[in-house]
């Protein structure tokens, strides 16, 4: 390809995008204001790798009025985008499996995701969605209660359960995956610049000028002596300009400021609790074996190695809202875990996290050309795990390289929000 491309943001989206671009022959530079990869939203994200399933309950009803109005107005245009997003997530599952096998990536993965059917009413509601999921390419099989408990023997015997739906996918540690894929990207020449803040993008003939500045933690930005930027080469201090053929923004809610254009985005908050799994000889089946999705509560439970991660309590706010502690959100995750897998973790050793991601009013990501020459966006939504990350990066890199993408991203283009 021979292009010189900048990627802004070294979360999972940024790392996968950089790798895919380098695999196509691009010269890639990644700019990250933090000290390593996957330190923000990808640090303790939803550990499920599963398709995006249209129709599942979401956080729309509790969203700000402005979001709900926009969501209602865009309802007629959403169907094509939903099908496209599901296709990207299915491609992501296949691409993640390929990368794991090719590079021997160990991200504490396990196969299997079951969607809980708590009662007959919920089971009937989810069964109505099966034709939609099937048409989108999602493979689904239904298990009765006994089969579900055989697949997940740690389930609470007293929890109401009429069965479950087995869907494509499994679980894995997104941060471990990003860390190991980063090394593969570096072997292909990708340069990572940590503790580096991108200040602005300026249009240039046939490209984009990116102004960046090395900003070490707890040190003034005006420092005049060189400093080693972690495991990258020492960087000069003060603003620096570099010209690129293209820039890919993977920095979530910070993308509109660099893009220089208003995007009607909101913030999606997702709470997470992670705790070590109890390992008791007398109870060898404590906790989940892989992935368990409580669609009614909007909570996912996943086993990653010897830990359990519970994710959910989604909430949509304005992009400038200050995240609160949300003790109620974390408590709801504890309650859900206790409902399905009681006593599987020592609750005094729980780690809590809160991530913020960009979300458009139609609930779909922004993937593709931004409308500004040379600037592309990879801004995925949260709430369904990281199964789509590799598919989005793979297809977007192909588009930037001028190749037909493995998944059609037209319905997910940022220009749909114009």
Image: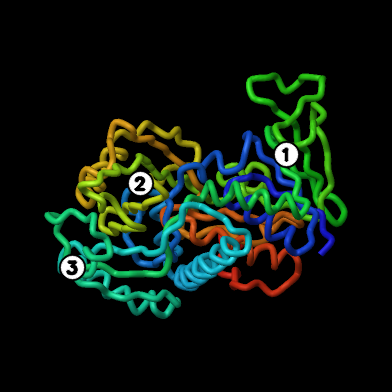
Q: Residue furthest front?
A: 281
Q: Position of residue 401 (x, y in %)?
A: 75, 66
Image: 44 above or below 401: above
Residue carrying label 3: 145
Who comes first in sequence, dot 3 or dot 2? Answer: 3
The residue sitting at 51% across, 52% down in the picture is: 107
- The label number, if any, that marks residue 148 in the structure image: none
Q: Which mark is residue 193?
A: 1
Residue 192 appears left or right of 144: right
The residue pinned by badge 2 equals 308
Secondary structure under badge 3? helix
Instruction: Work out which residue is located at the far right of the displayed protein and give it.
Output: 205
What residue lies at 76% left-to-right and 28% top-to-bottom?
A: 228
Of the image marks 3 and 1, the number of the one nearer the N terminus? 3
- What x and y, as percent, mark residue 341? 23, 50
The residue tagged with tag 2: helix, strand or loop? strand
Tag 1 secondary structure: strand
């Amino acid at each position: 390809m021979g292009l010189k491309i900048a990627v802004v943001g070294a979360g999972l989206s940024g790392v996968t995008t950089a790798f895919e671009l380098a695999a196509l022959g691009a010269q890639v530079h990644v700019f990250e204001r933090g000290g390593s990869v996957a330190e923000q939203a990808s640090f303790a994200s939803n550990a499920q790798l599963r398709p995006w399933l249209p129709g599942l309950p979401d956080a729309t009803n509790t969203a700000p009025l402005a979001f709900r109005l926009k969501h209602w107005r865009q309802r007629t245009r959403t169907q094509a985008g939903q099908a496209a997003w599901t296709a990207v997530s299915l491609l992501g599952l296949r691409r993640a499996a390929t990368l794991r096998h090719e590079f021997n990536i160990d991200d504490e993965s396990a196969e299997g995701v079951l969607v809980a059917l708590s009662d007959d009413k919920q089971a009937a509601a989810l069964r109505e969605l099966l034709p939609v999921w099937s048409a989108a390419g999602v493979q689904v099989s239904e298990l009765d209660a006994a089969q579900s408990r055989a697949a997940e023997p740690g389930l609470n015997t007293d929890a109401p359960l009429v069965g479950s739906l087995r869907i494509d996918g499994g679980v894995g540690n997104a941060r471990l995956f990003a860390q190991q894929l980063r090394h593969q990207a570096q072997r292909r020449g990708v340069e990572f610049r940590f503790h580096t803040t991108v200040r602005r993008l300026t249009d240039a003939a046939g490209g984009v000028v990116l102004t960046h500045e090395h900003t070490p933690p707890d040190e003034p930005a005006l420092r005049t002596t060189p400093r080693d930027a972690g495991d990258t080469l020492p960087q000069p201090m003060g603003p620096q300009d570099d010209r690129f053929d293209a820039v890919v923004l993977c920095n979530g809610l910070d993308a509109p400021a660099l893009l220089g254009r208003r995007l009607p985005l909101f913030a999606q908050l997702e709470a997470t609790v992670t705790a070590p799994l109890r390992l008791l000889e007398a109870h060898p089946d404590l906790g989940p074996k892989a992935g368990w999705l409580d669609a009614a509560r909007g909570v996912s439970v996943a086993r990653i190695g010897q830990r359990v991660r519970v994710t959910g309590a989604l909430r949509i706010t304005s992009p400038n809202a200050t995240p609160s502690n949300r003790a109620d959100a974390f408590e709801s995750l504890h309650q859900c875990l206790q409902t399905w897998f009681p006593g599987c973790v020592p609750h005094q050793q729980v780690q809590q996290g809160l991530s913020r991601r960009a979300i458009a009013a139609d609930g779909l990501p922004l993937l593709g050309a931004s409308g500004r020459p040379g600037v592309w966006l990879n801004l995925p939504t949260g709430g369904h795990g990281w199964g789509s990350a590799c598919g989005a990066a793979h297809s977007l890199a192909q588009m930037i390289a001028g190749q037909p993408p493995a998944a059609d991203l037209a319905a997910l283009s940022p220009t749909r929000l114009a």
